[in-house]
Amino acid sequence: MSGHSKWATTKHKKGAKDAKRAKSFAKLIRQVEVAAREGGGDVTSNASLRTMFQKARDASVPLDTIERAVKRGTGELEGLRYEPVTYEGYAHGGVAVIVETLTDNRNRTGPELRNIFKSSGGSMAEPGAVSWQFERRGIMLFDKKIAEDDLLDAALEAGADDVSDVGERWKVTCGPSELHAVRDALGASGFTSTSAEASLEPTQMVEIADETEAHKVLRLLDALDDHDDVQDVHANCDIPDQFLASFEG
């Protein structure tokens, strides 16, 4: 199990809390807007928009809210213009961190994220410093009520690369360009994912064997994820389940 997958599971739990729901919706809507602006408002021809549209629907964002976001992205409705900016850095123990943002003012976002890194004991790094330790993959999560062997057989037949255990979910991995086809094929076979997106996965891990250090890393990731402009946080930490549980507690 990768540290990224465990962190993703932690974020999923946090995002389900009522106090976080509005912020989660706002981030998803921003992703929809940018996808529509960059590739047009037709989900059938804009793969990125299709991914973000489905991601928002999976999170129970109202359909009319998503449609208004698409119109803002295409210019049919007035709205701010966001641009994707990626930041890189390090957490405690040399853990590599990549922060993906959508911002309307990079002169605000950069310094704010730098302060979060610094105050949490980490540091920002130059572009390319840690990105070589990650690769983009198509990732789908499925409920554990599904039998692993059944999901594995269907996933491999659909063109996926692997099925792995990430705690409370099964994770199906495929190439990022195959994400939609694999998800649709699995859906047609009766397997409905709880989430599906093209995300960064670490290619090498940093094991965290000390609980105090693990909590320092998680506090940084948590603080970064809470920033309004941050869309996703990726880290190559391998943190034992008991340290994750004690942090959540």
Image (spheres, grey):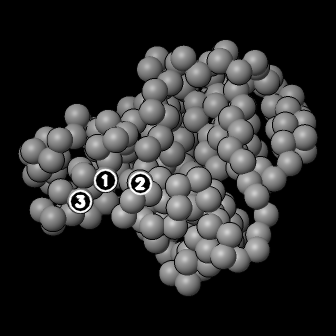
The percent position of residue 167, horizontal first and vertical second, equals 37, 45
Q: Quadrant of residue 5?
A: top left
- For the residues labelled 1 and 2, the Cα–Cα distance comes to 8 Å
At label 1, which amino acid type do we have?
Answer: His
Label 3–label 1 contact, CB within 8 A: yes
Mark 2: give few (<14), some (14-19) or many (20+) Cα within 10 Å: some
1 or 2: tag closer to the N-terminus: 2
Residue identified by numbered label 3: 184
Picture quarter with the N terminus: top left
Judging depth in this view, the residue of 21 and 69 nearest the camera is 69
Residue drawn at (68%, 70%) of the image: 75
Q: Which residue is mark 1?
A: 180
**Measured along the vertical axis of the image, is residue 131 above or below residue 187?**
above
What residue does disc 2 label?
47
Q: Nearer the viewer, mark 2 or mark 3?
A: 2
Residue shown at 90% from the left, 45% from the top: 108
Instruction: Tell me, yes or no, if residue 169 can be seen here.
Output: no
Residue 209 horizontal/vertical position (percent): 56, 20
Q: Which residue type carries mark 3?
A: Asp
**SS under mark 3:** helix
Left or right, 216 with respect to 159, comes to right
